[in-house]
Image (cartoon, rainbow, N blue to C red):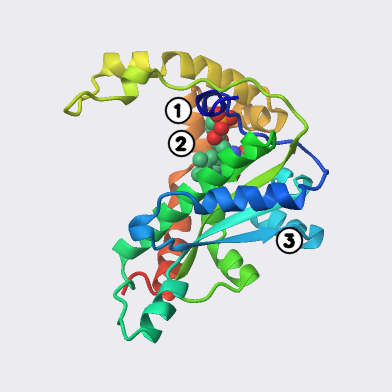
Amino acid sequence: MNPLELLNAHRSIRAYAPDPIPEDVLQSILHAATRASSSGNMQTYSILVTRDAERRRALWKYHFEQDMVVQAPVLLTFVADWNRMNRWCRRSDAEPGFDNFLSFLVAFADAMIAAQNAALAAESHGLGICYMGTTLCATTDLIEFFGLPADTFPATTLVVGTPREDPELRARLPLESIVHQERYQPYDDERIRRTYESRETEGWKRYMSFPDLAAKMTSSGVKNLAQVYTQLKYTQADNEEISTELLENLRRAGFLS
Ligand SMILES: Cc1cc2nc3c(=O)[nH]c(=O)nc-3n(C[C@H](O)[C@H](O)[C@H](O)COP(=O)(O)O)c2cc1C
């Protein structure tokens, strides 16, 4: 596949064979991750590789018991990391000024861009990947689990392994609803209706195809896909609770001073 074909063929994989990833392939994925652009070429991220089955089992708990975490042979946790850079600055008589929110965002972006490079590299080797958004919901546990020092923060996790499923491409919103020429084009009700029209039916059908989610959808009485998102998947109460924990951990890590 050429690079564009590879990008356009991406699907998240959620079922994996246990086959280990050959060391040279893993090294090539990690190397590609570090070839990503980064702010000032400072590379303010670290990548934690988890292969050990027991440690993956522990991570499975933190990642809301998503089974791919134990199935796939490798987990890559990307961490926003100023710790290394700060130490280098200090030993070079250069007092760092990176204990603030801007610097956190810079490192978080670096970590995410490196993760996406790793994802594409893995896919180019015929492997499957899935991001774990649950990383942001388990920062207290992950900081402890990985022994993360001050000036670092978990950003995301990639599950990587040999696919044991071959899912369809998932639809995207129409390009014209995402792209704005020159100035932001406000959305009126009609444009919103057109933007989400097919998502509403396809997304509903997809979620109803998962027995656990279908049972929840039926018993909770949600009437449409938007309600699935706001009342079942990403509720205000959960979002606020996790945000409180994130802010506390960001403060402890030194990014909110
Ligand atoms: C930051 C991020 C976090 C995600 N977290 C999860 C997750 O915890 N579990 C999961 O099954 N998929 C997760 N995904 C995958 C998305 O659900 C998936 O990318 C989206 O549904 C589109 O499907 P596709 O990747 O197959 O095109 C995540 C994706 C991103 C970018």
Q: Is residue 37 above or below residue 104?
A: above
State how far apart marks 1 and 2 are (Cα): 6 Å
Work out whether mark 3 precedes mark 2 in sequence or the reverse, and give the earlier one: 3
Which SS class for mark 2? helix
The reply to whether discs 1 and 2 touch (Cβ–Cβ < 8 Å) is yes
Choose top left, top right, bottom left or bottom right for residue 66: top right
Q: Residue 156: x, y in percent?
A: 53, 52
Of 70 and 209, which appears nearest the observer?
70
Q: Residue at x 62, y 69 (%)?
A: 146
Q: Is residue 88 above or below residue 21?
A: below
Q: Single out the mark in the foreground, 3 or 2.
A: 3
- Tag 2: residue type? Thr
| CA neighbours of label 1 inside 10 A, class few (<14), some (14 to 19), many (20+) | some
The residue carrying mark 2 is 230
Q: Which residue is mark 1?
A: 226
Q: Earlier in the sequence, mark 1 or mark 3?
A: 3
Other residues around mark 2 within 10 Å, as few (<14) / some (14–19) / many (≥20) = few
C-alpha span from label 3 to label 2: 29 Å
- Nearer to the camera, 41 or 69: 41
Give the residue at mark 3: 58
